Image (tube, rainbow, N blue to C red):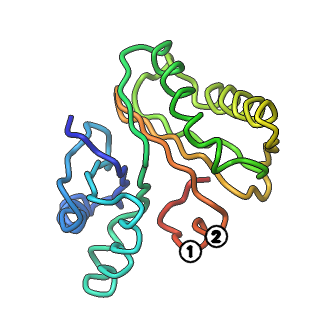
Amino acid sequence: MTRWNVVATIREGDFIRGRRFLGRFGPVAETGFYNVLVLLAQDPRMFLDEFEEARHEDPEGAASVVRAIPLTVTFTFQSAEEFEERAKEAATSFLTALANRSFHVRMRRRGFRRKISGMAEEQSLDGMLKQALADAGTPGVVDFTDPDAILALETVGTEAGMAVWTREEIVRYPLLRVD
């Protein structure tokens, strides 16, 4: 698979249009998962603003993309054990962003069915982050109702990515759909 830092879900029946629309932001690749594409955006954080600008030029193309989530840290894995190790390592890079805040982890898994449980991984990372934040003297609180931030974790086969999105960003960019 191609390197990527954005995972996008395309509306039913609009795969070609969605792929063409996303192509303006960087190289796009099929994933082997139904209506899921990956993209390598030059700047994953700027992708959402660029998407919003392009929506005015091509509203139908933009409407073909149901969900797109840029990721700022990516990694590969070959087993469930390696995934857990690398996910914990990647998640610790977000401790500063989660310090003294309410948060939770939300995982969308594609592949590794029956080998990786999204819910179990979310709970494990929530607990690990909460403990690491407390140990650093910047306690965080796991909150599913109205968190300050959400750590999004996406897997596509043997590749994964993460990013932290604040409450304000989630409201500003409905395309994220992290929860």
Corner quadrant of residue 54: bottom left
Label 2 with label 1: CB-CB less than 8 Å: yes
Name the side, left or right, on which 173 lies relative to 30: right
| Residue type marked 1 | Arg
Name the side, left or right, on which 143 lies relative to 76: right
| Residue type marked 2 | Glu
**Which label belongs to residue 116?**
none
Q: Where is residue 3 in the image (x, y as percent from the top left)?
A: 24, 40
Instruction: Tell which residue pokes out farthest to the front in this image.
Output: 137
Q: Give neighbour class at mark 2: few <14, some 14-19, many 20+ (Cα, 10 Å).
A: few
Q: Residue at x 58, y 67 (%)?
A: 169
Is residue 144 or residue 9 the one in the foreground? 144
Q: Position of residue 174 (x, y in %)?
A: 53, 69
Work out whether 118 lies above or below 68. Answer: above
Q: Which residue is drawn at 25% across and 36% down?
A: 32
Work out whether 150 lies above or below 114. Answer: below
Identify the secondary structure beneath mark 1.
Answer: helix
Identify the secondary structure beneath mark 2.
Answer: helix
Name the side, left or right, on which 31 lies relative to 72: left
How many marks on residues? 2
Kindly identify which residue carries mark 1.
172
Q: Which residue is drawn at 42% across and 22% down?
A: 112
Distance, label 2 to label 1, CA atoms, is 6 Å
Q: Position of residue 44 (x, y in %)?
A: 37, 58
Q: Position of residue 64 (x, y in %)?
A: 32, 68
Kindly identify which residue carries mark 2.
168
